[in-house]
Image (spheres, helix red, strand yellow):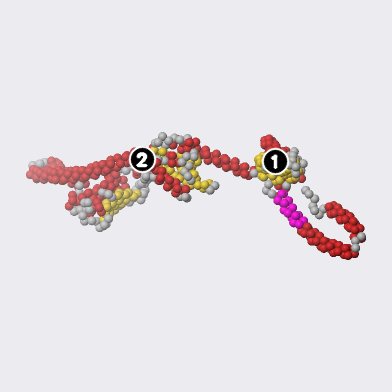
Amino acid sequence: MAKKPDDPKHLTGLRRQAEELLRMAERDVAAMPVKDVQQLVHELQVHQVELEMQNDELRRTQVELQAARDRYEDLYDFSPAGHLTLDRDGTIVEASLRAGLLLGNHRKELIGQSLARFVTPDDQDLFHRHCQEVLKNGTRQTCEVHIRKKAGASDCVHLESLAVHEEFGHITHWRTSLLDISDRRRTEQELEAQRTQLNAIIESAMDAIITVDAEGRVLLFNRAAQSMFGCRADDAIGQLLDRFIPERFREAHHGHMSFFARGGVVSRTMQRGGTLYGLRSNGEEFPIEASISRVLLVGKTLLTVILRDVTERSVAARALEGHVALLREKQSELESLTQKLLQAQEQERKRIARDLHDDFNQRLAALAVELETLERNLIVHLPEPISRQCAEIRAGIGRLSDDLHDLAYNLHPSLLDHVGLEVAMRDHVAEFTKRTGLPATFTPREVPKVLSPEVKTNLFRVLQESLQNVLKHAHASRVTVRLSGSSKGVGVSERDNGKGFDLESKAARVKGLGLTSMQERARLLGGFFRVHSLPADGTKVCVWIPRSQEDA
């Protein structure tokens, strides 16, 4: 460092020079005329004032220079970068406070030491080449090395060095700045690890991933994309994405990409009813599914397209559509067949019921009359046992006639045809109570006067089957039957207070023939069939037929 301007030794030398000049001036003044001496005194006084003013200016300049020096020292010592001055051998001549912190020593301890001793062994060759380049070329040189500290740890620092030349151009020493870049290097390593992991994910993805710039040029083309389009990444990168899109779709594609480039949200692309087509290198077109996302990176717009080949899915979808159509056709045929079977069943029941009532029952009645007549004519000639046996036969014929009558009624109640659904249901409920001893009530409400034969027959069959299930399974002590109508349709419900069952159990999901029959009857008429039940809470069966079927 240079001596300060107010150095006491410097001031003493100046005073001696001034005194010597004054003694010489006194000899000259003694020989001068008085008038000249007076003129000289005046000039000296003026010059004294001028010197005093210059002295004040110099003092102000000195204060400003000292302040600037102090600011420079603060910047030098407390700069984020450490600063060193080294001789040609690499020995430290000057050091800032920050340099001491970076090297793990007080800056006074650094003076006279070689900077190379602080460099880790692995970076020694790199540092020596750096020193040689600085001294050889005399231009600014940079490098990155690891610095050892007393605790054994090391930091990565960035060195920027510049040679200092004397007036004749020779290099006398050089200066270097040290900047700790350990955090930056760790961040770079983490970013590199994340980049490697991301590349591994992209390359192992089963979907094709393509990244393009705002002009549509390919920047990334992963392994799945290479396989999908039959094109190597080296041949795809730098090319326009149009290369992989059929010509007839390119205009729509440009509009779509422009929309996303302007800030459109992430979306699944659609084309021709939802299908987008890709173009392989061999000219083959194939259906794909695509999604596009947009990202701004260093002021540049990048679009990433994720593509999936849906050829197999499209084939499977078409096959499934064919199967579904065939299934619907078969279902329609099955429904038609079921309806015809139920109609044929009802017709056959009606015929059998009529035959039983009009033929067999009449013949049994005639046989009973004939037996009664024979018994009356021969009663005086017949022994008592034979007469008693004839009476028993006649009673058995009567019971058989009643059973045939009940069977014919169950097969097809004639009341349905003659007096309607309400009366037929009321009679059936009463007959059920009489036959089983189980109390059952019937409540009608706003029952339509006119119902189609199909609606009457099917609702009556549902009631028959429901009461039969109560008798077989419910263990109930009370049954309630309701027949209700409205402007929207007509329905019947049967409820018991029996043991009920769990609708979610495996046994409940395996429906019996009776439940299936009731459900099918309601479905064929466009209605619905419901069963509500809980263990120990009874069961409720409901069937509803819409008005359109009532009027049919």
User: Which of disc 2 and disc 1 is earlier in sequence?
Assistant: 1
> Is 11 situated above or below 143?
below
> Which residue in the protein does label 2 denote?
317
The residue lying at 77 percent from left, 48 percent from top is: 1
Q: Position of residue 460 (x, y in %)?
A: 24, 49
Q: What is the number of the mark on residue 138?
A: 1
Neighbours of disc 2 within 10 Å: few (<14), some (14-19), many (20+): few
The magenta stretch is: 61-77
What amino acid is labelled 2 in the image? Ala
In the shown orientation, is residue 447 left or right of residue 78? left
* In front of the other: 450 or 93: 93
> Residue 51 sits in which quadrant?
bottom right
SS of the residue at dot 2? helix
Q: Is residue 16 visible?
A: yes
In the shown orientation, is residue 362 left or right of residue 271? left
SS of the residue at dot 1? loop
Q: Position of residue 511 (x, y in %)?
A: 32, 43
What amino acid is labelled 1 in the image? Gly
Q: Position of residue 302 (x, y in %)?
A: 50, 45
Q: Mark 1 to mark 2: distance in Å?
A: 75 Å
